[in-house]
Structure formats: C-alpha cells, structure tokens
Amino acid sequence: MIGIGVWGPGRVGTAIARSVAALGSNSGYRMVGVSPRDIGGRCPLARDLDVPTMTPAELVTTADLTVLAAPDDALAEAATALAAQVIASGHSAADRSVVHCSGALDLSVLASVGALGAAIGAWHPLQAFPTTGSPVRPGITWAVTASPELAATLTELSLALGGRPFTLAASAKGAYHTAASMAANYLVTLTWHATTLLESCGLTRDDALAALLPLLESTVAGLAGAGLPQGLTGPLARGDMATVESHLRVLAERPDTDALYRAAAAATLPVLAARGVGADQLARWQALLDGA
C-alpha cells in the first residue's frame, strides 16, 4: 500500500487528493494526509476525505509519496521551507518521495528536499483545472520526470487514475509546456476575440460564449476522430479564398483581431501543406494574408 499526501492543495492538489481517495482501499493507494499552505485548524479537504491535517514535516515523513502542489513561482521556496521543517523535526526523508506538479519546471526546484535523501520528481497532469472542484479527467496524459524507480511508481499511479503516462526528459519540459499553453491558453484567447465579434451581432458575451462552445466541442471531437491534419475545417481547408477575403473586410476596423486572424491563418498554411495543398495555392494564400 502506497501512502500519498498532498501539500498545499489548490486546484491541482485538491483534484489529485480526491482522485486518489476515490480509488479505494483495494487499489494499493491511500491518502494519508493533507498539509494546507497555512497551518491552523483542520483543512476542509482533509475533513472531506477523512484524513489527518498534518504539518509539512509530518506529511513528508509519513507519506510514501508527497505531492507538492504549490504554484510555479513558489515551488522552490516551498521546498526549501519543507526541507527546513523536516530537519527541525529530527525525522528522515531518506526513504520518501516528493514530486511537484509543474509542467514547466525541472527538478532543481526540489533540490533542498533531494539533499535530505528523498527521491524527487515531476508529475504533471495535462489538463486544465479552472476551479478547486475540477476533477482529474480519465484519459489525460501525465508527464513523468524522475529517476527510474520513482518514474515507475508515478507511471503505475497515473494508470490507476485512468491516465496515459509518458516519460518526459527534463530538457524537453520547455517544449512540452509551450505546447500545452498554445493548445489550452490561446484557445481561450481566440474564443475571446470570437465572442467580441458575436457581440457586435447583438449577442451578450455569455450568449456568445454559449453559442461558440458547441462549435469548439465539435471541433475537438473532429480532431479526435479525424486526427491531424484532416481535422481542420473551414474556408482555408476548402480553398475558399472569397470567404477569407470577406473576413478580412469585416476585421478592417478591428486591428487587434485582424492581426490575430492573419497570424493564425498564416500559421495554418503548414497544415494545408500537410493536407496536400500545392505550393502555388499556398503562395496565393500567403499573398492574401500579407495584403499583397
């Protein structure tokens, strides 16, 4: 039985703790405790899961695996404070493991904990967690960066949570997190600009978003079914230059959205090439987007 603890349960930590607890006693995993960022009274999450509220030092020296769920910019400081508390407690962390959940940071932020003999790693769930009520979704990818022994533990835990684990080299974390940000964050940016256009059609922002969400969902479903590059739809995929010209006329008085549209369309040209669109047609598209 592998005991798991969560320090600093925000959106990601809360989701992981609830998911591990939901696995049940026959899974080989159990939640042993939660340590809130501000110790004082019992943590609501610990109460909900019926596990103890622990100090960070108690958590690390009790749990086999501690998930350090701090924001990226606070991870190194949190790890240093954690190591200091373990030293002050007089307990050993030599047979314990501590991981962070950052997709962007390598293992150096946990160096102070690693110096105590704990195995350290990174375990990143590739999904968005907009609220503390967001659950870990089945089928998500988990990026694992750790020594072989700890990586094996994290891989098995990811599988138990219904995930798809893969080993991510520390040197590749920059490219990995950039990809995640492009796919998730900038989809929101594109949707923001799309809603402003629909507001000009008479919809409220909420109604505009409600109108676009099924379109976004069907696009994702299309990607899941057709893959890349065939999942692309719309006027570029159809070779419909007249429609794109009409879009550019609409955007003439919206310079910010116009710049985004042109950049996104230009960035779509490699997708068209992968679909077999010839060089001459790609050049015509580029000329239109350049305003030539």
Image (tube, rainbow, N blue to C red):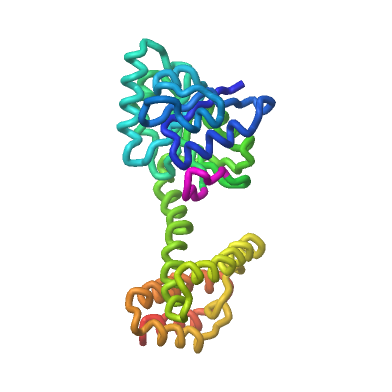
**Where the N terminus falls, by quadrant?**
top right
**Where the C terminus falls, by quadrant?**
bottom left
With 210 as the anchor, is 195 left or right in this view? left
**Residue ranking furthest to the top:** 90
Specify whether residue 72 is painted magenta: no
Q: Is residue 73 above or below residue 36?
A: below
Task: Give the quarter of the image for residue 232.
Answer: bottom right
Task: Give the quarter of the image for residue 171.
Answer: top left
The image position of residue 210, as x and y in percent, is 54, 67
Could you tell me which residue is drawn at 41 percent across and 13 percent down?
Answer: 92
Camera-side residue of 12 and 238: 12
The image position of residue 41, as x and y in percent, is 41, 25
The image position of residue 228, as x and y in percent, is 58, 64
Q: Is residue 185 above or below residue 191?
A: above
The image position of residue 234, as x and y in percent, is 56, 77
Q: Is residue 101 above or below residue 97?
A: below
Count the marks: how many? 0
Specify whether residue 134 is painted magenta: yes
Boundaries of the magenta span: 127-136
Camera-side residue of 191 and 226: 191
Could you tell me which residue is drawn at 58 percent across and 81 percent down?
Answer: 238
